Image: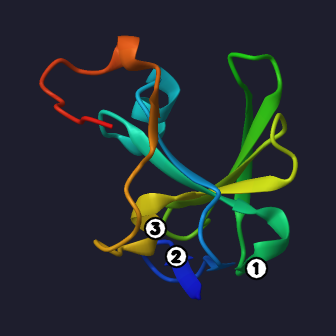
């Protein structure tokens, strides 16, 4: 099975083959700022199962663990489509919303619960 993730304008795409290794919901402040929402959700795929097409701009920041995370987004519409956490070099994280698929597998873990907004009632 192959799934297509893309930015809003469709210029940056990631084709992901197979099932994600994990789907993670993150309440950290950096994800809140990156998404403009109260959390971010990432589907982690084996690197060899992800094909990226289209122009992209990148931004790197230090993770809480001290290793960089590089985010890739569309230079036209600004949507973040995928990112590469150096602490997981064999995986690529793809923003779950980039699939625009309500049947996508739900998150199996949540992290940074201490930053969860109290009105967000997500049970994992």
Judged from the image, the secondary structure of the residue bearing numbered disc 3 is: helix
The residue labelled by disc 1 is: 51
**Residue 72 appearing in the image:** no
Judged from the image, the secondary structure of the residue bearing numbered disc 1 is: strand
Tell me, yes or no, whether the two marked residues, 2 and 3, touch with CB atoms within 8 Å.
yes
The residue labelled by disc 2 is: 6
**Of label 1 and label 2, which has the lower sequence position?**
2
In the foreground, 72 or 63:
63
Residues packed near mark 3 inside 10 Å, few (<14), some (14 to 19) or many (20 plus):
many
Residue drawn at (71%, 24%) of the image: 63
**Of label 1 and label 3, which has the lower sequence position?**
1
Q: In the picture provided, is 56 more to the left or to the right than 48?
A: left
Residue pushed farthest left? Answer: 119
Distance from disc 1 to disc 3, alpha carbons, whole Å, reads 14 Å
The image quadrant of residue 18 is bottom right
Distance from disc 1 to disc 2, alpha carbons, whole Å, reads 12 Å
Residue pushed farthest bottom? Answer: 1
The image's mark for residue 98 is 3
The image quadrant of residue 66 is top right
Judged from the image, the secondary structure of the residue bearing numbered disc 2 is: strand
In the rendered image, residue 14, in percent from the top left (x then y), is placed at 64, 76
Query: Where, quadrant-wise, is the N terminus in this rendering?
Result: bottom right
Residue drawn at (38%, 11%) of the image: 114
In the foreground, 71 or 16:
16
Is 83 located above or below residue 18 in the figure?
Answer: above
**Residue 92 appearing in the image:** yes
Is 30 located above or below residue 54 in the figure?
Answer: above
């Amino acid at each position: 099975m192959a799934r297509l993730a893309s930015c809003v304008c469709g210029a940056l795409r990631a084709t992901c083959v197979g099932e994600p290794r994990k789907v993670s919901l993150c309440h950290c402040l950096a994800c809140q700022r990156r998404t403009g929402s109260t959390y971010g959700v990432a589907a982690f795929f084996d690197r060899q199962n992800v094909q990226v097409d289209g122009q992209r701009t990148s931004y790197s920041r230090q993770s809480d663990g001290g290793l960089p995370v590089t985010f890739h987004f569309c230079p036209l519409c600004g949507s973040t489509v995928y990112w590469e956490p150096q602490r997981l070099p064999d995986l690529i994280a793809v923003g779950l919303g980039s699939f625009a698929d309500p049947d996508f597998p739900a998150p199996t873990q949540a992290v940074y619960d201490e930053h969860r907004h109290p009105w967000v009632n997500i049970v994992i």
